[in-house]
Amino acid sequence: MNQSQRYLWSGDEAVARAARDAQVAWGVGYPGTPSTEILENLAALGGKARWSPNEKTALEVGLGAAFAGARALVTMKHVGLNVAADPLFTAAYTGVSGALVIVSADDPGMASSQNEQDNRHYAVAAGVPMLEPADSQEAYDFTLAALEISHRWHTPVLLRMTTRVCHSQTIVVPNRRIEPPPPADFQRDIQGRVMIPAYARPAHRRLRKKLTEIEAWNESSGPNEEHKGKPALGIITSGISYAHVAEVAPDASILKLGMTYPLPMERIRLFVGTVQRCVVIEEGDPYLVEAIRAAGIAVEGKPEMYRYGELSVERVRRILAGDTSPEPVPPRGKPPQLCQGCPHRTAFTVLNKLGCIVSGDIGCYTLGVLPPFEAMDTCVCMGASITVGLGLRHTLPAEQARRVVSVIGDSTFMHSGITGLVEMVYNPPPQGHVVLVLDNGTTAMTGLQEHPGTGRMLNHEPTGKVSIEALARSLGITNVRVLDPAADPAGFEEALRQALDAEKLTLLVARRPCLLAAGKIREYEKTAELQRSGCDCQAAGNDQVSAGGATQT
Amino acid sequence: MKDNKVTNVVIAGLGGQGVLKASDILSRAIFDQGLDLKKSEIHGMSQRGGSVTSDVRFGKKVHSPMVPVGEADFVVVLAPEEVENARRYLRPTGVLITPDAVDGEALSNKRSINVALLGILSRHLEIPESVWRSAIRACLPEKLLEVNENAFTLGRGTS
């Protein structure tokens, strides 16, 4: 036994602790369940952590930090990696000088997501090594390992987690150590980092060579574990699925893969040779089983019905028994709803009353789709409300087109609504368009995070503030109004009615702080005001704090 | 507790009722006993008043963080309307603890029902009372301590 202290940490907290212990220079990301708590914990531990407008900007900032020789951690939920995919694929070519670890927190079963995409495919598609922790101990250890691998092979590394690993609390003994990073320093490397075709072609070849080396390392020394059991049953697994497997089949031989790209195929082949029956147990898509079969190794996979949703002890039992009978349907339980007194309630009541075709977006306000409001007609991805709404406006018959409204939250607007506004100005529909920004002064859905429109950083300290209405006006949208629907429902209804009739490009900002955030926002503003005024007491009285815009009407 | 036996607890209720706080306190108490432990729940949409469950499993060695349906030794339910949903987790010999197990009139603050029900649970677990009390102190802010300590006493003392 070692002397190290034991802790009870969530997977997210363990990643944050590892990042702090490794002196990661920058933690950057966009909030998204189940990844949000990583950066919040890193900030609470005294690390440098920042919210970025979206995952693409976050990854690029992290890449810059890693070009400068520093260690960077970039966090996002699975769909966030779609937004960040552009830099990801070419960062695999450029590589990094310091270290760059990208956390993709996948959500099998969609506890709080619009799809259950399996981001293991991204590792293969982009050509970046991937580690998959099974619990908080591994979340800690693998974060450090990912930083080392990233630095050793000058490559971004994907740390692929899932909801259960992110949010389950398990015991961690943090006894792994990592060398401190060197100071940041710019070393010019034009051919390595300027991806014009002439330099990108050799970069692609370098990437494939690196992956071959990493594969060889994974074969001999990767973070993979073999539990020798009885030879009758062998199981190949990774991540949270291992936990279920270890419970269901304690006597089986188990090969638990910690690094799932590039795969240690010879080790897998040897393992399969030692058992009579070999089953691959993995959550989500048949990623491992297809790769293993493509290598000419005969293994069993799971029946298609288990592709959907999370795995569990019960489901692993069924898979091993070859049971494809219908599963018991769990009771639905009480669905979530917009809080009583939530300012969004008025907005959706009016949208419903006016018979609007609502192009919706991602956030708390997506709950406007549920009864009693049922005031949402589309919801696809962050920012799509504005542009899908434009597509509807362009193509529907005029009498329907006039009723289309794009509804987007303030944080989502900052994330990817701005280019939609540019599209609206550039290609205006004949009947104009109405964009309604539900500005509650926070990122409510993920637990009240700051964003560029609040004028505060992740740690709630004041910073530059982006004004939604000023931005819209600067783009040439002249019909811009800021209202408080909860304070004046009739006025809000009249304003929306006028906007629909006006057939112009209109941006309405429905501004009122989230009920859950209002008290905290007041505290942050008070603190900021005190800091600004400093010893100049007279200034405190008449100085309008820039962060105070949430009450503007 | 027998060797290698994993004890499974499911705490169920509605978002905002303190389900996660209750499982935090339980986990802290178990952790301080030196046992292996896993605690799991789904965050996210559940924050908006929907059904929430939190699984706590402990013993010498715990693998899966999720309590399988029909294998919970204890199911603690904070909301009357969630009892039927949560009951499916219980094993045939398991103990169901429902909100009516506490005398609501005796609770000085209705919001501390979560800690009162932990008091009832505590009677079934081999964890010293002092460990429970320090777990409560570790998980709750100073201003909420007295009302919750009283709620725990009520749950632990009444039968």
Image: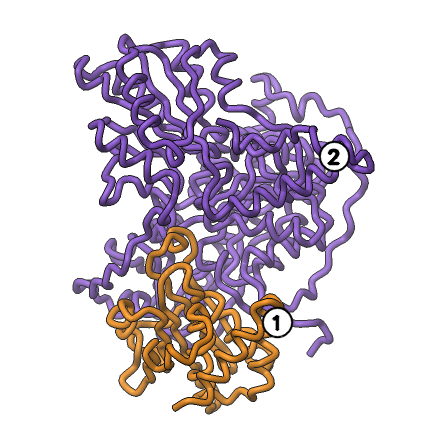
Residue A180: percent from left, percent from top: 78, 50
Counting other residues with Cα less than 10 Å from the Cα at mark 1, is it few (<14), some (14-19), or many (20 or more)? some
| Residue A415 percent location from the top left of the image | 49, 31
Chain letter, purple = A
Label 1 to label 2: alpha-carbon separation: 35 Å
Question: Residue visible at 54% across and 52% down?
Answer: A131
Q: Is residue B117 above or below residue A21?
A: below
Residue A460 visible in this rendered orientation of the protein? yes
Q: Name the residue under label 1.
A: B138
Q: Please tell me in which quadrant of the rendered image residue A189 appears.
A: top right
Q: Which of marks 1 and 2 is in front?
A: 2
- Residue A532: image tag: 2
- Residue at mark 1: chain: B
The picture quadrant where one finds residue A497 is top left
Q: Looking at the colours in the rendered structure, which chain would you say is drawn in orange?
A: B
Q: Quadrant of the C terminus of chain B?
A: bottom left
Which of the numbered marks, if any, corresponds to residue A501? none
Which element type, helix, strand or loop, lies under badge 1?
helix
Which residue is more in the foreground, A66 or A346?
A346
Q: Is residue A19 left or right of residue A446?
A: right
